[in-house]
């Protein structure tokens, strides 16, 4: 996507369809002039061009003698606007016809239709924001949970950019010292203390690792905390999924082995997104398709942050601990396990209590439910929210939510490991700086100090039009 700064772009910035009002946005050097040519202020007098910035004007949009709508026009002047250019926002009535006619009028008077993300691209090109902040704006628009909103806002304010700028400037300071040595190469001096350099690189690698580790958390925030529903066939996993989603998403039947593929969907509870994944019942089988389903189930169990393991309340109280103990071997210490004794409506209460007692005695988090009757589902949701909350970042944490950032961090790490190897092998300063510069470049890719057209195209094409 190339930036032609001579054009003035226009787009409808509010969602399509009917709202009380809609906003049409223009940006570029002719934004105010173009608006002036179709705007008649109610209080006759100065044209918009002669008005001060950051003021709002009431009047009509006209097509020749025909009044199209009554609107409010907000003025922003370069460089203090979203894009860094002159920006006009026209608030008109929400009618689709009004919006279309207005946009068409603007185009007729010299504006061009904006491409997706073009306003934000201009903001980036004009140095108003860096690339990771631009991505955070897209994330903020797309955020569907309180935590996703908070993390995106932190990144938009420059949380990640600030952190990376610190790391980069430390590396730059060191390369400057090494380069100074090169100027005095005849005299065999060392301005850059090798021991200090090694410590610096190690501490930067540690910082990168912390950031990279936050990626799985970041992913959970963006796409929901993965909660896998597992258990033997026919215990009611799909019934529970449907109950939690409040939708008949998965097929339920009394035939064991009904679910084959993993079925998932996201909902949010208590301000947190959860992605529930129903899986094939775990058992030994000769059925090829079912085995593939079970392989998928195991993969989904491995990836889960929370596992809901279902058992049938009609089970034998003496064998249940064994089954659960065997299952937890598949889990890691960082995963949360909740055991659900399902179909409690089918067993005498005393039996259910015995089963629960045995599990709790072993230290398991266990709850009796009826997925079919909806019993204790609210308690289960509260339990999930409580676990979800402890899984969420603190206010000030910098979290990586973007795979592009994660990959760049990993590449920077590889280059820094090369520097450590180089130091170990007593490589000369000029060779060390090659790898250090590479790391600096990778870190710069995240904020867009180093960027290429393909990356920009990719990022901005994902925006909605009007942003
Ligand atoms: N009484 C009662 N029946 C239930 C309950 N939950 C599920 N069932 C029934 O148990 C049978 C199996 O339910 P599913 O949800 O298909 O079980 P599943 O674990 O997904 O089974 P597979 O996909 O075959 O592994 C169905 O007939 C459900 O109606 C419950 O809480 N109480
Ligand atoms: Mg099922």
Image: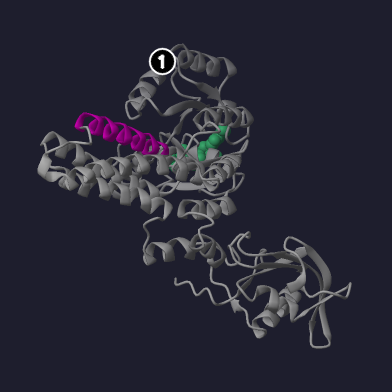
For the point 50% across and 60% down, the residue is 124
Sort mark 1 into few (<14), some (14-19) or many (20+) by Cα contacts within 10 Å: few
Answer whether residue 199 is magenta in the image: yes
Q: Residue at x 26, y 44 (%)?
A: 175
Residue 295: image quadrant is top left
Quadrant assignment, res 219 = top left
- Above or below 103: residue 345: above
The quarter holding residue 303 reads: top left
Q: Residue furthest top?
A: 361
Q: Is residue 206 left or right of residue 383?
A: left
* Residue occupying the point 21% across, 49% down: 434
Q: Is mark 1 within 8 Å of ligand 1?
A: no
Picture coordinates of residue 456, whole percent (x, y): 42, 63
Classify residue 99 as left or right of residue 459.
right
Q: For the C terminus, which image quadrant?
A: bottom right
Outermost residue to the right: 43
Magenta span contains residue 375 = no
Magenta-colored segment: predominant secondary structure: helix
Residue 22 x %, y %:
73, 66
Q: Nearer the viewer, residue 297 or 50?
A: 50
Q: Quadrant of the N terminus?
A: bottom left
Q: Secondary structure at mark 1?
A: loop
Q: Is residue 181 left or right of residue 364?
A: left
Quick check: can you spot residue 250?
yes
User: From which residue to which does the magenta span run?
Assistant: 194-214
Q: Is residue 280 above or below residue 124?
A: above
| Of the pair 391 and 373, the residue shown nearer to us | 391
Q: Position of residue 408 (x, y in %)?
A: 34, 49
- Residue at coordinates 63% horizontally, 34% vertically from top-left? 374
Residue underneath mark 1:
318
Q: How is the image coloured?
A: one colour
Choose between 118 and 222: the one closer to the eye: 118
């Amino acid at each position: 996507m190339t930036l032609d700064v001579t054009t003035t772009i226009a787009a409808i910035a509010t969602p399509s369809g009917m709202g009380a009002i809609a906003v049409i946005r223009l940006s570029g050097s002719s934004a105010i002039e173009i608006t002036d040519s179709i705007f008649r202020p109610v209080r006759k007098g100065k044209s918009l061009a002669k008005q001060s910035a950051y003021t709002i004007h009431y009047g009509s949009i006209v097509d020749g003698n025909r009044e199209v709508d009554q609107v409010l026009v907000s003025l922003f002047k370069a460089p203090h606007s979203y894009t860094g250019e002159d920006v006009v926002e026209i608030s008109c009535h929400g009618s689709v016809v009004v919006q279309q006619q207005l946009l068409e009028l603007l185009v007729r008077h010299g504006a061009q239709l904006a491409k997706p993300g073009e306003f934000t691209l201009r903001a980036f090109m004009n140095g108003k924001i860096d690339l990771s902040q631009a991505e955070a704006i897209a994330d903020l628009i797309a955020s569907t949970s309180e935590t996703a909103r908070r993390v995106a806002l932190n990144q938009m304010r420059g949380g990640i950019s600030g952190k990376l700028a610190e790391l980069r400037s430390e590396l730059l300071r060191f390369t400057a010292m090494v380069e100074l040595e090169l100027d005095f190469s005849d005299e065999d001096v060392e301005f850059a203390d090798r021991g200090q350099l090694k410590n610096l690189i190690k501490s930067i690698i540690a910082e990168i690792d912390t950031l990279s580790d936050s990626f799985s958390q970041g992913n959970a925030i963006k796409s929901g905390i993965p909660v896998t529903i597992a258990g033997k066939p026919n215990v009611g996993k799909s019934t529970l999924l449907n109950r939690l989603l409040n939708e008949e998403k998965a097929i339920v039947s009394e035939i064991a082995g009904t679910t084959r593929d993993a079925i998932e969907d996201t909902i949010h509870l208590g301000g947190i997104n959860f992605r529930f994944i129903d899986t094939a019942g775990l058992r030994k089988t000769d059925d090829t398709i079912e085995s593939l389903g079970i392989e998928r189930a195991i993969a989904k169990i491995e990836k889960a942050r929370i596992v809901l393991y279902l058992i049938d309340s009609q089970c034998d109280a003496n064998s249940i601990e064994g089954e659960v103990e065997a299952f937890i071997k598949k889990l890691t210490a960082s995963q949360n396990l909740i055991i659900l004794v399902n179909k409690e409506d089918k067993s005498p209460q005393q039996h259910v209590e015995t089963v629960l007692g045995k599990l709790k005695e072993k230290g398991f988090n266990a709850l009796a439910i009826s997925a079919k009757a909806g019993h204790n589902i609210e308690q289960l949701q509260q339990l999930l929210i409580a676990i979800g909350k402890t899984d969420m970042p603190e206010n000030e944490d910098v979290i990586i939510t973007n795979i592009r950032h994660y990959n760049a961090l990993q590449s920077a790490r590889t280059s820094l490991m090369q520097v450590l190897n180089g130091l170990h092998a007593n490589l000369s300063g000029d060779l060390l700086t090659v790898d250090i510069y590479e790391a600096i470049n990778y870190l710069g890719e995240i904020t867009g100090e180093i960027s290429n057209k393909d990356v920009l195209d990719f990022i901005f094409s994902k925006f909605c039009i009007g942003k």
